[in-house]
Image (cartoon, grey):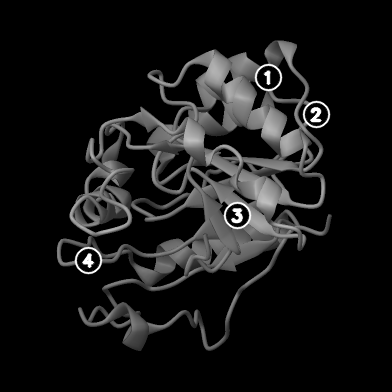
Amino acid sequence: MATKIEWTQKVWNPVTGCTKVSEACQNCYAEVMARRLQKMPGSADKYRNGFQPTIHVSSLGEPLEWKKPTMVFVCSMGDLFHNDVSIDFIDMVMNVIRECPQHTFQILTKRPERMARYFEFRSVPQNVWLGTTCESDKHFDRIDYLRKIKDAKVRFLSCEPLLGDLWGINLRGIDWVITGGESGSCARRTPVEWFRTLRDVCQRNFVPFFFKQWGAWSEDGIKQSKYKNGSLLDGREWKEYPNV
């Protein structure tokens, strides 16, 4: 399915639903979207459980139908490595990924400790990028788990919404950083200095930096439409990608 998420091209949701594990989850966009989809014709059946973790065997074959090479975000509406998702089902997802070498699959989790355990005795498909969320310095340990996955072609961080100053972040072994502000009526403001600090750390470490958006709060601290706020940081866009 096509998506408006700027750093990918399509989303694939063999798993939907999740449970909150940290402060970034407070205003989860996927939870809000799932409740909307639950009431919409054409998607009501898939989201009949709302935001409860749910596997969808019927969705497994979707990438096999996409012939054009595509960047695919896996489980934009959930977490593949949620504890309620069985290892057998994760294996099924990886098997489909291996059958689609023309695509690049981006897997993002807030549970990198389980992802690291999963890949301890399994190889990472070469067309997979592995990422974890690190919204504040409370979660630097997630990056350590991600680093433990030795044969990942690309390791990336989503620091969105950015909820703390990451000046002490260690980017050893990290190939890409995505960040952005929070959207929605309850969005928390991110000071511009926090974005600048993360950008500067990325530049010092030669890590591509992707600034997705300001979100609900502008650079000047005005709450308004995220579309009006845009994605300029210090007068320019930062839409860098890993050089793979």
Q: Which residue is mark 1?
A: 119
Nearer to the camera, 197 or 227: 227
Sequence-wise, the earlier of marks 3 and 2 is 2
Say what amino acid the circle numbered 4 marks: Gly
Sequence-wise, the earlier of marks 3 and 1 is 1
Give the structural element (helix, strand or loop) at label 4: loop
Nearer to the camera, 81 or 199: 81
Nearer to the camera, 133 or 96: 96
Return the x and y of residue 40 as percentages of the image width and height.
Answer: 23, 59
Would you identify the image quadrant in which residue 194 lies? bottom left
Whole-angstrom CA distance, mark 4 to mark 3, is: 23 Å
Return the x and y of residue 113 as percentages of the image width and height.
Answer: 52, 20
Q: Nearer the viewer, mark 3 or mark 1?
A: 1
Q: Which residue is mark 4?
A: 184
- Does residue 140 appear anywhere in the picture? no
Query: Is label 2 in contact with label 1 (beta carbons under 8 Å)?
Result: yes
Q: Please tell me which residue is depicted at 15% across the width and 67% down the height of the picture.
A: 185
